[in-house]
Amino acid sequence: MNAQRAQEIMESADMRKVTYNGDNVYIEHVDQGTGHATVHPIDSPEQKYMVSVDQLEE
């Protein structure tokens, strides 16, 4: 995925299925400049990860 698409998903009112390493995640923030996103597993909001958006799959 690219940073623009990650931003669109994050801002969307619709819940989209996004995975990181096979786990369903929620995108909290996208840094367009660096191409990174802050995500957390759907079932573990306390576990936050900073990942490259190209590692996210829709």
Image (cartoon, rainbow, N blue to C red):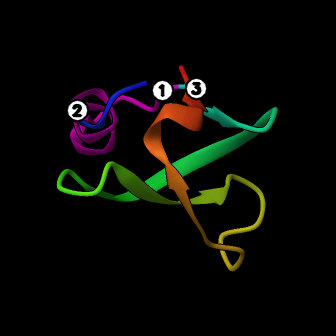
**Magenta residues, as a range?**
4-16
13 inside magenta stretch: yes
Which residue is rendered at x = 32% and y = 48% of the image?
A: 35
Which residue is rendered at x = 45% and y = 41% of the image?
A: 53
Quarter of the image where one finds residue 55: top right
Disc 1 crowd rating (10 Å Cα; few below 14, some 14-19, many 20+) is some
Asked if the residue under mark 3 is in contact with the one under mark 1, i.e. CB atoms within 8 Å, the reply is yes
* Secondary-structure class at tag 1: loop
Locate residue 30, reporting x and y percent.
30, 55
Measure the C-alpha gap from mark 3 to mark 2.
13 Å
Residue type highlighted by circle 1: Arg
> Closer to the observer: label 1 or label 2?
2
Measure the C-alpha gap from mark 1 to mark 3.
4 Å
Q: Is residue 32 above or below residue 31?
A: above
Judged left or right of residue 47, residue 34 is left
Q: Furthest residue to the top?
A: 58
The residue pinned by badge 1 equals 16
Q: Nearer the viewer, residue 15 or 51?
A: 51
The residue pinned by badge 3 equals 17
The residue pinned by badge 2 equals 8
* Secondary-structure class at tag 3: loop
Judged left or right of residue 49, residue 13 is left
Q: Is residue 38 above or below residue 52?
A: below
Which residue is rendered at x = 45% and y = 32% of the image?
A: 15
Which residue is rendered at x = 78% and y = 38% of the image?
A: 21
* Secondary-structure class at tag 2: helix
Locate residue 45, reporting x and y percent.
65, 70
Residue type highlighted by circle 2: Glu
Asked if the residue under mark 2 is in contact with the one under mark 1, i.e. CB atoms within 8 Å, the reply is no
Quarter of the image where one finds residue 50: bottom right
Query: How would you classify the magenta stretch by its main secondary structure?
Result: helix
Disc 3 crowd rating (10 Å Cα; few below 14, some 14-19, many 20+) is few
